[in-house]
Image (cartoon, coloured by chain):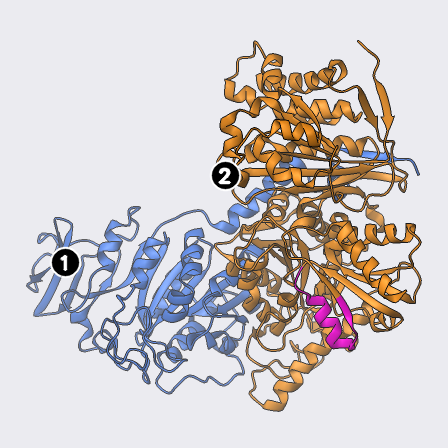
Amino acid sequence: MKIKRIEKRRDVSIRFCGDSGDGMQLTGTKFADETALAGNDLSTFPDFPAEIRAPAGTLAGVSGFQIHFASERVHTPADYPDVIVAFNPAAVRANVGDLRPGAMLIINSDAFNKKAWQRAGYTEDPIPDLRERFELVEIPLTALNREALVGLDLTQRAIDRCKNFFALGLLSWLYGRPMESTERWLGNKFEGDVLEANTRTLRSGWAFGETTELFPVSYQVPAAKIEGGSYRNITGNTALAWGIIAARVLMDRQVFLGAYPITPATDVLHEVARHRNFDIKTFQAEDEMAAVSSAIGASFAGNLGVTVSSGPGIMLKQEAIGLAIMVELPLVVIDVQRAGPSTGSPTKTEQGDLLLALFGRSSESPMPILAPSSAGDCFDTMIEAFRLAVKYMTPVMVLSDSYLANSSEPWKIPDIETLQRSPIRFAKREDFGEEGFMPYVRDPETLARPWAIPGEPELEHRLGGLTKEPVTGNVVYDPDNHAAMLKLRADKIAGIVADIPNIEVDGPTSGDLLVVGWGSTNGAITAAVDEAREDGLSVSRIHIRHMNPLPSNLQDVLSHFKHILLPELNGGQLSMILRSLFLLDIQPLNKVAGQPFRIAEIRSAIDEILREVN
Amino acid sequence: MAASASPLTRKDFVSTQDVRWCPGCGDYSVLANVQRVMPEFVEKRENVVFISGIGCSSRFPYYMNTYGFHTIHGRAPSFATGIKASNPDLSVWVVTGDGDGLSIGGNHLLHTIRRNLDLQILLFNNKIYGLTKGQYSPTSDEGTRTKSSPHGSIDHPIDPISFALGSGATFVARTIDVDATHMQQTLRRAHAHKGTAFVEILQNCPVFNDGVWEDVQDRKTRPDNSISLVHGEPLVFGTPGNLKGIVMNDGNPQVVDLTDDEDPLAKGIVVHDEFLESTAYAFALATLCRPDFPLPVGVLRQVEKTCYEDELEAQIQDSIDTKGPGSLEKLLHSGDTWQVPG
């Protein structure tokens, strides 16, 4: 065997793509796990169609998984992949537009027969053209996988299904990824011939890389310098689920999760449902209205009620959320936003529900809104959401999105001891004087009313959506009372501003340009701003996590910059809010393509503004 | 059940709120009867929760001095589900109407019934929308003329009892607002049942649908127009001199005349059985319509099935027994993790 050259790389981005049934998400996830264990910082972006199995070989069925890893901090999955691994012609056709000329394109050459490239919409054999434009590596994946698995008692179909692990083995060799975690995973997941087949083809892929003439060079991406501690990979949806579980532990109160399946939020229900041993109740309701209503009922009974959905489902829940605002019960509502409106593109990302969260209920019905900025931040945001919901007796909305939901990043596992424990105290008869319990007396500081739960003697009371008078909660129709109660509830939510951190500016606190972001765009904005600074530009940056109420120093921070750029994955919703609140000329940068921002898109907006200034 | 066990009386369940239903509304009678039987059911008022949706009937919780929640249109069963699943020790009562329960709330009613949580659902059926001032409801008879159906309703009505049976209800009963004794007896049976007890209460709306149940409410006409279901008793109705019974003819119910001294069993009159596993008989009863048949009143069906909240608790216990109580530390460190030197 020839000794092959090893080249060092600072960062690499790889996209695996193939048919929805080719196992691209699994291949990518396993490669990401190996990469994390190799000590790199990383960011992933799964991009898959809404159809479970679109017709094989068609563009509609192409599923992709991009991973960006480096020996330094990584903020996004990278604008463009350095390498594309494509399992069929459709995958090439759907993805090759993102590949720079001369970059590496690895294909399963067995999948490039005439019928297949025609099905993908090519009118002539694409191979000659691809050879010209890229560093095309043609590997007969199907045949090599079959050879590796000769003698196993499996159907041809079952054998062919293993070929993604041949590719995983090959790529693991190419980038020096340790495969122990993948082999361990296979051992836990499969047994018998299926285990043998996957393990054997994985190792064959590695060995093929070592011996083939096709790859004269392999690459090394040294471990990144990151803060010490215990790490794991985590997706936003898992972090949301674990945040719910953490709240159950930290508040020492049972959780009730009412949910109805909807992409891309369902994984949160799946993950929480697995952990019944935390004494957590999950309820798959008959629809979105029942899901939220049951969660509010659970809160009425003294549990931590939570519901999770996506935009179309949140629409259906809004009526019940309005009731929770009116009766002032704690509730956490998670909106894993997707690209809409209506059914829209269920697996694609967007930040289109901000105004829905702020104003999408009847009348004046404010509620706190939080937006996590990364997969890991989803965990902390959930704990914060429950804290606010209970302390202020209010529903709280958490705005995640499809990108955060499915993409993963290394996450420093928090020290449990440092997480804030906030046990709940329910109302008792002795808290009240001779006049007895009153359901609508308020804590003078938080303006929250007491949480009095059924089963507790002498606190019997009736809640309802009708306008009530203060203190007694009796139904009244007096107009002044209506206005006063509405203002009281609004003041309560606005007052939360004293309980949330101020905005911190990344960079100088005054200057020509401030880039304002919220939610999942944090990575792309950070990378673009960092790039601009490396090029000598002066750019500052803030990221808003508390969307309502907004941090108290926000107006002051904004006022110190000549230009404010606000990139968001919608038509300009936060721009509209900040403009109207502060009468500032915010410059929106909007994208509604179902895809996250590319760094370059934000960077060019930065450059354009600074060019005008200078 | 004797009332002596409880230290509570009817008055303990009367709230301070002024009752604001229209004069003559059937809801007054339901409220009074519920408040009367409550002391038989619980020793502690704080363990009782009344949940309602929207409509005239849904004001009910405000008048009960228990825990109560007046929620949103149609969703009361879902709120009740969350409450009962969260705290199975509570006595949970859902109060709804034909509009609230069977129009906007039909889906929730269906699924709550099939899950068989141990709670009581009282559906007040006056065959009209009262609170929105008189539109036809899903139980309104065809041809009902209202402001929204000036030419007569062309909807085919739904029968609440058939709906409940079709949803897999383990307890289905019907009673009448003006018959205090029968209603109290039915409420006792509903409360004693372990599982979702569905009770349709025929109720008069004196303003928008006055007299819709008159033939079965009026003491004089009731015997000829209704049949009182008693387990183990033959399906006989009418008054002496004009007795009738129900026989099954090739699976179809049929009314036959009886003389006063005739043995109904000898004549083949069907003997009422609440406990049949098959719903076929209960469905046959539910389809009996006036004027050709009497309206069945009483418990149509009672069977046993597991309750959702019990199974949920059992799964949690089972999970704790097999995996041990959840540890956040262990969860966060589960699967592949790695150490970065600090």
Relative to the observer, which residue lies in front, B157 or A355? A355
Q: Position of residue B22 (x, y in %)?
A: 39, 86
Q: Which chain is blue?
A: B
Task: Indicate the chain on which mark 2 is placed.
Answer: A
Residue matched to label 2: A54
Which tint was used for chain A?
orange
Query: Residue B209 location in percent, x, y?
Result: 29, 80
Quarter residue A412 falls in:
top right
Mark 1 belongs to which amino acid?
Answer: Ile
Q: Is residue B119 magenta?
A: no
Where residue A571 sits: x, y (%)?
66, 64
Which of the two marks, 2 or 1, is nearer to us in this view? 2
Callout 1: 10 Å neighbours few (<14), some, many (20+)? many
Q: Range of the magenta residues?
A: A570-587
Q: Residue B234 carries which label?
A: none
Nearest to the observer: residue A596 or residue A30? A596
Is residue A571 highlighted in magenta? yes
Label 2 and label 1: CA atoms lie apart by: 58 Å
Please tell me the numbered disc located at residue B246. Answer: 1
Note whether A370 is above or below B179 in the view shown: above
Name the element at disc 1. Answer: strand
Q: Mark 1 lies on which chain?
A: B
Q: Can residue B122 be seen in this view?
A: yes
Find residue B191 and report its horizontal and vertical position in percent: 42, 61
Q: How crowded is mark 2: few (under 14 residues within 10 Å), some or many (20 or more)?
A: some
Q: Residue at 47% of width from left, 77% of height from top? A: B59
Instruction: Specify whether A9 is left or right of B135.
Output: right
Is residue B88 shown left or right of residue A375? left
